[in-house]
Image (cartoon, coloured by chain):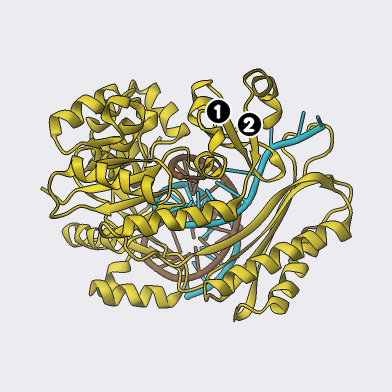
Chain colours: A yellow, B cyan, C brown
Amino acid sequence: MSSPFAIADCNNFYASCERLFRPELKNVPLIVLSNNDGCVVARSQEVKDLGIKMGVPLFKVQDEIKQHGIQVFSSNYTLYGDISARVMQTLEQFTQLEIYSIDEAFLDLSGMSALNDYGQKIRATVLQHVGVPVCVGIAPTKTLAKLANYASKKFKATRGVVDLRDPERQRRLLGITPVAEIWGVGRKHTQSLQRRGINTALDLAQMDRHQIRRFYSVVLERTVCELNGESCIGLEESPAPRQQIVCSRSFGEKLTRYADLRETVCEFAARATEKLRTHNQLALVAQVFIRTSPFDKAGPSYDNAATGKLTSPSSDTRTILELVTRLFDMIWRDGYRYAKAGVMLGEFCSPQHVQLNLFESRVGCAQQDNLMQAVDSINQNGKGKIWFGGQRPQKDWFMKQANLSPAYTTRWGSIPKVK
DNA sequence: TCTGGGGTCCTAGGACCC
DNA sequence: TCTGGGGTCCTAGGACCC
């Protein structure tokens, strides 16, 4: 059996952070808002129990807020980042860690025993050192670990830890879990799966993987494998370098004047460039976008973006600002009420995107592991095509890695679209 | 009146070359 | 002028995550 993973996930993270310094708010319903206080991005358990959904605009829940005395906070990302670092430092003392998001981390539990007790120990330690409650899910794959974590939060009797290594237990839990709860199954896939009569996670796990590949993608296929206990997504101990840095905002008040919007875009560019330097990276391309609100039915709508390349990779504010303002001027149109704008910097290093097409099947590959699988498929079929988005050096690198001769890049027919 | 921000990966298909 | 295979490069956009 493959070595088990755990995922430790903080409960209602932003809400728990706010409570750390306001202990009197324990058991008081509490929400945290996005920038500009536009919508709800975090909810305490009491608020979740009231049925208030993640991401709803504030104005839609004003009545509930009054009625139930919900405490409302603007978000404080500096604080959350700080608390997150402390949680991660505490988890690091246990075992190899992959920090997955601000409030969750995967842990490598290979060689450990008494995993339920171990999970309880993780919980108790984080609570004691940082004061934030976490729940722990344990399973042979990351996707099942996420499912175990879901169960540990949903069912109080688990006391915040679920060990899902037993296949029979996996089956039972899969059978009572809606397919939408599975990591990697979003809104669109849920709708589509339900139309096929796939309602529970178990239904999905029992689907034929080739069908999944045909109707959906390699990504969902991987999810199905993981639900069946076959580990496809490994622990990534060192974080991969960023591929893009984005700075964007919706405006509380709409902008209509050239000078105002231009200044805002320049601020974004400067901030993005700062981030670039913090990460020790150089950007080669920049993109600027501006748009009116899709909810604003009154005025005319406008949505445009422009992308441009620097002559050489750079993290110099003036150089990037010069490009960004030029791009902005290309897309600026007078007469609209702009609601959002942003700047994206990218292509820091050789692009990692590689796509492989095979006769009668397609495999999209972004990771080296899958690439090797793809190479095997090519070798078996004796034909295929590897398509490289991005630049030359990436291709040369891969050909060398995979020990492939250039002959393998011969294209084989076109691939019919499967409906 | 008021609708987040920051990411990743995969796929289709157009433009262009011979 | 049209059709067609074979190939490269790039971009838009859709799906997902927190």
Q: What is the chain identity of the residue bearing mark 1?
A: A
Q: Position of residue A64 (x, y in %)?
A: 64, 20
Around disc 2, counting alpha carbons within 10 Å, would you say few (fewer than 14), some (14 to 19), or many (20 or more)?
Answer: some
Residue A28 marker: 1
> Outermost residue toward the top?
A67
Location of mark 2 (residue): A71
Residue at 24% x, 42% y is A138
Count of picture labels: 2
What type is the residue that disc 1 sits on? Val
Residue at 81% x, 62% y is A263
Marks 2,1: beta carbons within 8 A: yes
Quick check: A192 left or right of A261? left
SS for dot 2: strand
What type is the residue that disc 2 sits on? Gln
Q: What is the chain identity of the residue bearing mark 2?
A: A
Around disc 1, counting alpha carbons within 10 Å, would you say few (fewer than 14), some (14 to 19), or many (20 or more)?
Answer: some
Q: Is residue A52 or residue A30 the one in the foreground?
A: A30
Q: Are marks 2 and 1 on the same chain?
A: yes
Sequence-wise, the earlier of marks 2 and 1 is 1
CA–CA distance in space, label 2 to label 1: 7 Å
Among the 4 quarters of the image, the one containing residue A39: top right
Quick check: A118 left or right of A290? left
Does any portion of residue A401 appear in the rendered image?
yes
The quarter of the image holding the C terminus of chain A is top left
Q: Is residue A132 or residue A266 the one in the foreground?
A: A132
Residue at 49% x, 22% y is A49
SS for dot 1: loop
